[in-house]
Image: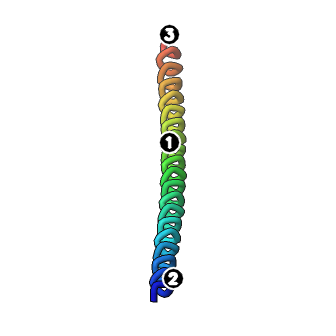
Amino acid sequence: QFKERGLRKSSLEEAIRNTKADLMQQWGNAERQYIAEQKVHMLNELSELRHRSQSDYQGLEHKLLADVSWF
């Protein structure tokens, strides 16, 4: 009977260790996925900002050239 309890206890401890390992792995995967999504989001924002500032610059350049042509 003691041997049986010992086996059940070790099986339970192993199940706990496996569950903990699985949870840690899932947490790590979720963390890496979140970081990757944040990088993509930031790169998209940067690209949009770059495009917008380039458009603003070109618009300003055309306006200045038009203003200069009056002289």
Q: Nearer the viewer, mark 2 or mark 3?
A: 2
Closer to us: 49 or 68:
49
Q: Position of residue 63 (x, y in %)?
A: 47, 24
- Assign a secondary structure to mark 1: helix
Residue type beneath disc 2:
Leu
Q: Which residue is mark 3?
A: 71
- Assign a secondary structure to mark 2: helix
Q: Position of residue 67 (x, y in %)?
A: 47, 17
Q: What separation in Å lies between label 3 and label 1 (alpha carbons)? A: 35 Å
Above or below, comparing residue 69 to residue 6 in the picture = above
**Residue at the image point whose x is 52% and y is 23% from the top:** 61
Q: What separation in Å lies between label 2 and label 1 (alpha carbons)? A: 61 Å
Between discs 2 and 1, the one toward the N terminus: 2
Q: Counting other residues with Cα less than 10 Å from the Cα at mark 2, is it few (<14), some (14-19), or many (20 or more)?
A: few
Closer to us: 37 or 9:
9
Residue type beneath disc 1:
Glu
**Residue at the image point whose x is 53% and y is 46% from the top:** 39
Viewport quadrant of the N terminus: bottom left
Above or below, comparing residue 69 to residue 20 in the picture = above
**Residue at the image point whose x is 50% and y is 85% from the top:** 3
Q: Which residue is mark 2?
A: 7
Q: Counting other residues with Cα less than 10 Å from the Cα at mark 3, is it few (<14), some (14-19), or many (20 or more)?
A: few
- Assign a secondary structure to mark 3: loop
**Residue at the image point whose x is 47% and y is 83% from the top:** 8
Q: Nearer the viewer, mark 3 or mark 1?
A: 1
Q: Which residue is mark 1?
A: 48
Q: Counting other residues with Cα less than 10 Å from the Cα at mark 1, is it few (<14), some (14-19), or many (20 or more)?
A: few
Q: Are marks 2 and 3 in contact (CB under 8 Å)?
A: no
